[in-house]
């Protein structure tokens, strides 16, 4: 951690909640520094009105707010969507994508106001501390980093409330949801409370973006999503901006019970955590994008791209957005996306996404090749020679009397490794 007398001005990632409100006077008291608050609007749907007054009343010298919603979807969500990146089979990386964007703007503001440090309210147990700090290190390693949760003696909400009251910090609520949540245009995450036991089924009242499949409409709805070079540009014939398009699909998907995920995931710091995610629009977009790729990409590219997606997801989850490898993988992904241009029709019904059609001028599907009817472009007798060559290695093994893998294989003798 930086020496406290070395910090003159710090940019704080500020939400206006209890924790970040308390951090303002704590920084001034413990570091003797000027505090600049920064609030990023990434679609968290929290009330931003009045935050400047609250930040200044808490002791901040300046307050910045930036509407980053369009940038978030365009520059962070869509690259991950094109990659098909999903962490540990289920998590669509909502929080993971937003943190490097917020940290990037914190660095920009630090340069603008002449700050020599940034600060965040992430705990020492989670992934967000890594995402904030690796982004800062990548973009300006000269900036010092302050993480109060790794330093202070505040250990509970009651401690924070008492600290706020003692320092005349304006707080309006003393009760908190039993769930810890993070929200942006892509998703809403839930942790804590009943979810601390992974045996517990999430309670219906916890969900905020989606209805349950049981309570979803009895009639299906169809949506048509148009892509240009892997980027969704229109829904049902209406061209929309990135943020508008995602919001539109969030509303439709949420109403039909789409995008709920219950996951026990491995955090970067080593522990397991149990989270429930709502990603209605993102789940629809991922399904549509995959369907279109199946039509226009060859199988080798799809297979290798799936391998890249696993590494891409790991890098994003681990806070390495601005690492050279993530940027290189993004360049590979972009090189595959030109033909991912066309339209996908999906049917949404009680939590299910059902493909109802796809089309593209770059389609690799040929009905005259694939038909089971009479055709002249494929001589079925050619398959015999192909199969003979393809299975040659299997034939040679059998002719040499070698066992089939897993059957009649010699068992290793471990007795020679026993200690006397």
Image (spheres, rainbow, N blue to C red):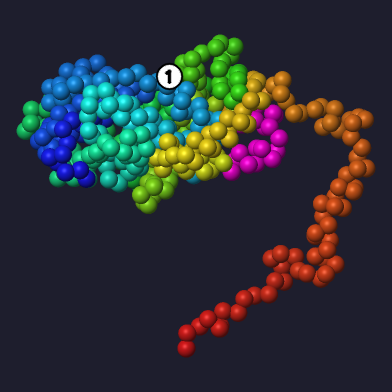
Q: Is residue 205 left or right of residue 285?
A: left
Task: Tell me: residue 69, above or below residue 28.
Answer: above
219 to 128, vertically: above or below: above
Tell me, yes or no, whether the highlighted magenta stretch contains residue 302: yes
- Residue where numbered disc 1 is placed: 70
Type of secondary structure dominating the magenta stretch: helix
Q: Depth check: 57 or 211 in front?
A: 57
Residue visible at 37% across and 21% down?
Answer: 68
Q: Considering the numbered disc 1 on the image, is that residue within a helix, a strand or a loop?
A: helix
State the residue at coordinates (37%, 52%).
270
Residue furthest left as drawn? 166
Question: Foreground residue, 304 or 237?
Answer: 304
Quadrant for the N terminus, please.
top left
Left or right: where does residue 47 sit relative to residue 71? left
Query: Image quarter for residue 131?
Result: top left
Q: Quadrant of residue 299?
A: top right
Give the residue drawn at x 17%, y 18%.
Answer: 53
The residue shown at (43%, 46%) is: 265
| Range shown magenta | 290-307
Q: Position of residue 12 (x, y in %)?
A: 23, 30
Q: Position of residue 263 (x, y in %)?
A: 44, 42
């Amino acid at each position: 951690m930086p020496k406290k007398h070395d910090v003159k001005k710090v940019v704080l990632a500020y939400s206006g909640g209890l924790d970040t409100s308390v951090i303002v006077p704590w920084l001034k008291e413990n570091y003797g520094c000027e505090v600049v608050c920064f609030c990023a609007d990434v679609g968290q749907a929290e009330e931003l009105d009045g935050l400047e007054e609250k930040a200044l009343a808490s002791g901040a010298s300046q307050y910045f707010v930036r509407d980053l919603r369009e940038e978030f979807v365009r520059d962070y969500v869509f690259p991950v969507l094109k990659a098909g990146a999903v962490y540990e089979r289920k998590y669509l990386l909502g929080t993971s994508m937003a943190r490097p964007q917020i940290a990037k703007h914190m660095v920009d503001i630090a340069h603008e106001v002449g700050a020599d440090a940034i600060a965040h309210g992430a705990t020492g147990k989670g992934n967000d501390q890594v995402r904030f700090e690796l982004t800062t290190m990548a973009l300006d390693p000269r900036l010092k980093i302050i993480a109060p949760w790794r330093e202070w003696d505040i250990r509970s909400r009651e401690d924070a409330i008492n600290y706020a009251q003692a320092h005349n910090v304006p707080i309006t609520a003393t009760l908190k949801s039993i769930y810890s949540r993070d929200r942006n245009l892509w998703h809403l995450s839930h942790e804590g409370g009943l979810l601390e036991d992974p045996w517990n089924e999430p309670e219906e009242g916890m969900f905020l973006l989606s209805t349950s499949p049981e309570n979803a409409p009895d009639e299906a709805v169809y949506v048509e999503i148009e892509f240009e070079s892997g980027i969704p540009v229109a829904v049902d014939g209406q061209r929309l901006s990135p943020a508008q398009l995602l919001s539109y699909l969030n509303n439709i998907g949420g109403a039909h019970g789409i995008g709920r995920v219950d996951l026990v995931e491995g955090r970067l710091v080593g522990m397991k955590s149990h989270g429930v995610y709502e990603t209605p629009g993102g789940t629809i977009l991922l399904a549509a994008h995959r369907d279109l790729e199946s039509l226009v990409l060859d199988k080798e590219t799809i297979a290798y791209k799936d391998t890249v997606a696993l590494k891409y997801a790991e890098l994003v989850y681990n806070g390495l957005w601005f690492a050279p490898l993530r940027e290189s993988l993004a360049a590979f992904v972009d090189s595959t996306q030109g033909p991912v241009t066309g339209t996908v029709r999906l049917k949404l019904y009680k939590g299910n996404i059902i493909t109802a059609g796809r089309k593209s001028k770059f389609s690799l599907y040929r009905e005259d090749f694939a038909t089971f009817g009479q055709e002249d472009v494929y001589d079925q007798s050619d398959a015999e020679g192909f199969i003979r060559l393809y299975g040659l290695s299997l034939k040679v093994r059998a002719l040499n009397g070698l066992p089939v893998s897993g059957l009649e294989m010699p068992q290793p003798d471990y007795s020679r490794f026993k200690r006397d």
